[in-house]
Amino acid sequence: MAQRKLRIFISHSANAIEEPATQAFLDALAARLQGDLGCEPLTDQKDLTAGDEWLQRLYAWMGLCDAAVVLLSPRAVTRENSTWVPREANLLLWRKALDPRFVVIPVLIGGVTPADLAGNPFLADARLTDLQFAPGLAEAAKIDGIVRALREKLGAAATRLAFEPVRVHVEDCIQRYAPDASVDAALAQHYGADPWQPFVPPREKLSLKLVHRAVSPTVDPVIADVTLGSQGDARLGARLFEVLFPMRLPAGCACDLLALCRSKEGHGSILVNAHDTWAVRMLLRTATGLPKDDLLRCWHIIELPDGWGDDDLNEITRFLAAELAEAILGTNGWDELSDRTDPAERLKEQLDALTFQLAEARRETGAPILVCAAYRPRWVELATALVGRFPTTVFLFWTGSELPSLAPAADCTPLAPSWPAGRDREWQLTYRRKLKQFGG
């Protein structure tokens, strides 16, 4: 398989009329990235077209790119109410925090100084000065420095792209099941006039196009066309739709949910205005960029039955321990943790062994165990005690269409801002209807 081009996201506020020098810098940098490194520069000026879901596309680019350059020009930093470049910068730095190998190069241009960053409330705490700036150089020399740094850093790093597992899954499905004629026809009909034409084989190109456009339902006709002539039992349309659908859900809510799951691990619980865990699973896929099977290998998600918290705390602890053991060890996992016959000794050994196994699972998967249940005020109180006993867990309670009107306990955090009442049901019904249409 031919190697794809590296993608470099350029965050900027260039405007040919208001700030022509920045526009010239952007054009020169994009040309050098293409000419010297053979990269694909991703900018919103040339790669977004009328009718695009532009915000979601930008989120997708920031997740798909191999590296990023942030152009800190006067229009981006010192102009009143200038928030877009600072927002992108913080999202890119969040990616770098998740993977230190991810390359972010901020560059001061147009006379902007570190003092100007300190005066911008959205950039003051971003610690951009800890990264490369190439201070004191002429603008052309800064471009040389950016190209040189990217060549060195990308050559040394093998970055795991945020949505790369989805793209690989899509390409694998197309390689296995899509007829050549259907791939060529789908590319010509839907993307023939697209200015972004990566120089890769048709199947890889179509997979890139589908992932780039997955934030919008406009990919559905493409899926329908590429499945023409494929074997029915391969379920190609259902496979593609199922893996791409999470990317059209709200990226902001998804990232907030992921951040809450990590921050509340061992510290209380989360409230979500959903009707079950379907939306939770989908939003975690949106935020992590993982297909369903990959997500379930990393994230253990337990659904507790109604009434689980009606016993005394000791019985509830024993019940939850058995559920946790089954989640990480499989069927009869709880029974396998001890062979003692004395009930008290057996329970103690089981709990001690489970504590060790949970810590090992957390280290290996990199994710907490998500314990989900319908919302009850008493169960929120129980969650505080239970996460203290099982510190690698986080409790999530779904509340139905609306969050409770009364303020939750201090250690219980609602997902906010959330989605409109009943929206999770709309997503689920749309998903089921379309999946059925595609043969699922």
Image (cartoon, helix red, strand yellow):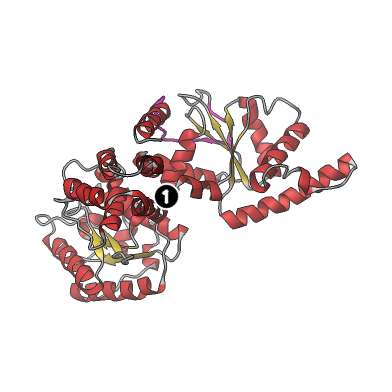
Q: Is residue 55 above or below residue 2?
A: above
Image location of residue 341, percent across then percent down: 89, 43
Q: Is residue 415 magenta?
A: yes
Q: Residue at position x 45%, y 49% from top?
A: 290
Image location of residue 227, percent across then percent down: 30, 43
Q: Locate the C terminus and report the quarter of the image it occupies.
A: top left
Q: Most extreme residue toward the left, as rendered? A: 17
Q: Most extreme residue toward the right, as rendered? A: 342
Q: Is residue 250 magenta?
A: no
Q: Residue at position x 37%, y 53% from top?
A: 176
Does 127 sit left or right of 22 as displayed?
right
Q: Residue at position x 50%, y 23% from top?
A: 405
Q: Amino acid at mark 1?
A: Gly
Image location of residue 203, percent across then percent down: 29, 55
Image location of residue 185, percent across then percent down: 20, 48
Does 67 sit left or right of 377 as displayed?
left
Disc 1 target residue: 289
User: Which stretch is magenta?
Assistant: 407-423
Does 368 sit left or right of 231 as displayed?
right
